[in-house]
Amino acid sequence: MNSMSTLANSLIRQGLRGAVGRTPMIRLGRVSEATGCEILAKAEYGNAGGSVKDRAALYLIADAVKRGQLKPGGTVVEGTAGNTGIGLAHLCNALGYKCVIFMPETQSKEKIDLLRVLGATVYPVPAVAYTDPNNYNHQAKRFAEGLENSVWTNQFDNTANRLAHYETTGPEIWEETEGRVDAVAFATGTGGTLAGVGTFLKERNPDVRTFLLDPEGSVLYNYFTHGELKRQGDGSITEGIGQGRVTQNLSGAPVDHALHITDAMAVEHTFRLLHEEGFFVGASSGINVAGAVQAARQMGPGHVIVTCLCDLGQRYYAKLFSRKFLESKNLLTAVPEDYRQWLH
Ligand code: PMP
């Protein structure tokens, strides 16, 4: 054996950076059969940091380095519901940066614990609206301004986020479906996934339809349906999605349809994914599959609809999979009866 030769081919990923993207494309059998469509999902939990946000995190860091805002040994500061922070923290470890995260204290304990294990400094802050100067994003911005060799990566308004999906997720979907994708359906937090994927696919085929999936308490359903920035419903148990404004990443995005997906639908589909398809994922994946099913029903049989499984259920174990928590939110009945016996 020649120990000096480097083994390199397209099947070998180069370190952590190489382990972001190229996620499996999975056909979901039960919902495909129920709708007569092909419902496919990118397994975004398969990225090295465990979520769809790893792609954005990689591009946000690369953008900061390119602009000269982040130098060796510097600090990445971000406001996040958790997953972008987890992606950034993984990359900071691999690339030699420090990581500081501001996060609404309402987000899951599992994500906060994971961030700390990864070595990030985490500041859980009260969950106040974007208009409040103490909102987690503004706190992250101010913190970075006061620290030398640091950057606030600004995932909501830095369009390096959607570029990640334009350059990676979109082309992967096009290639994996051999150009046969008819529609995509994504829950929206920053809007990076929907805007990047939607823009790329429509450049390839203008007939590809885009569905924005909006949880309770978010304004985007009303914005894209009636032009009003008005909340639909109260807060949601989902994390990382829903929005109170049009971010720069969502601005100008090609959105054909917006669907309001209730927590009850999200919970039902999360548990069907677990017990019928076998995927243990978080509630935004439940929203994604609920939305893909609605899109399939709207478009009729014979279409190829693509969504993603954003992250894994372990990040929400104590809440989403707890009988007591679901009862407290009046959502126990949303779990199909046969599956309630396994709630802890
Ligand atoms: N699902 C989860 C679990 C997330 O954390 C996020 C992003 N915060 C999304 C979906 C939405 O992704 P995007 O920000 O690209 O709209």
Image (tube, rainbow, N blue to C red):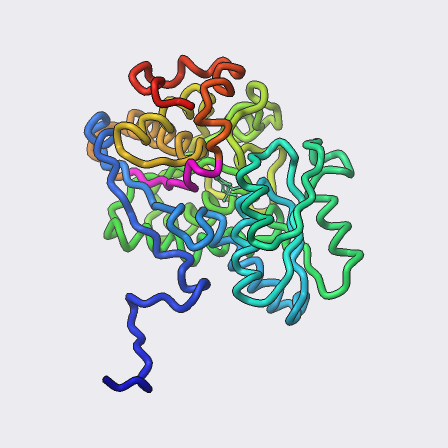
In the figure, residue 247 lies in which quadrant? top right
The residue nearer to you, when weighing 254 against 138, is 138
Quadrant for the N terminus in the image: bottom left
Count of numbered labels shown in the rendering? 0
Say above or below: 1 vs 32.
below
In the figure, residue 9 lies in which quadrant? bottom left
Locate residue 181 relative to residue 148 in the image: left or right: left
Locate residue 179 relative to residue 283 in the image: left or right: left
The x and y percentages for residue 338 are: 29, 16
The residue nearer to you, when weighing 118 against 194, is 118
Q: Residue at x 44, y 48 (%)?
A: 50
Q: Which residue is drawn at 58% across and 63% down?
A: 63
Q: Residue at x 76, y 64 (%)?
A: 148
Could one spot residue 267 in this view of the protein?
A: yes
In the figure, residue 151 lies in which quadrant? bottom right
The x and y percentages for residue 7 are: 30, 77
The x and y percentages for residue 68 are: 66, 69
Q: Which residue is drawn at 77% across and 50% down?
A: 142
Could one spot residue 250 in this view of the protein?
A: no
Q: What stretch is highlighted in magenta?
A: 305-315
Locate residue 137 relative to residue 111 in the image: left or right: right
The x and y percentages for residue 173 are: 32, 50
Quadrant for the C terminus in the image: top left
For residue 310: magenta? Answer: yes
Locate residue 233 relative to residue 212 in the image: left or right: right
For residue 103: magenta? Answer: no
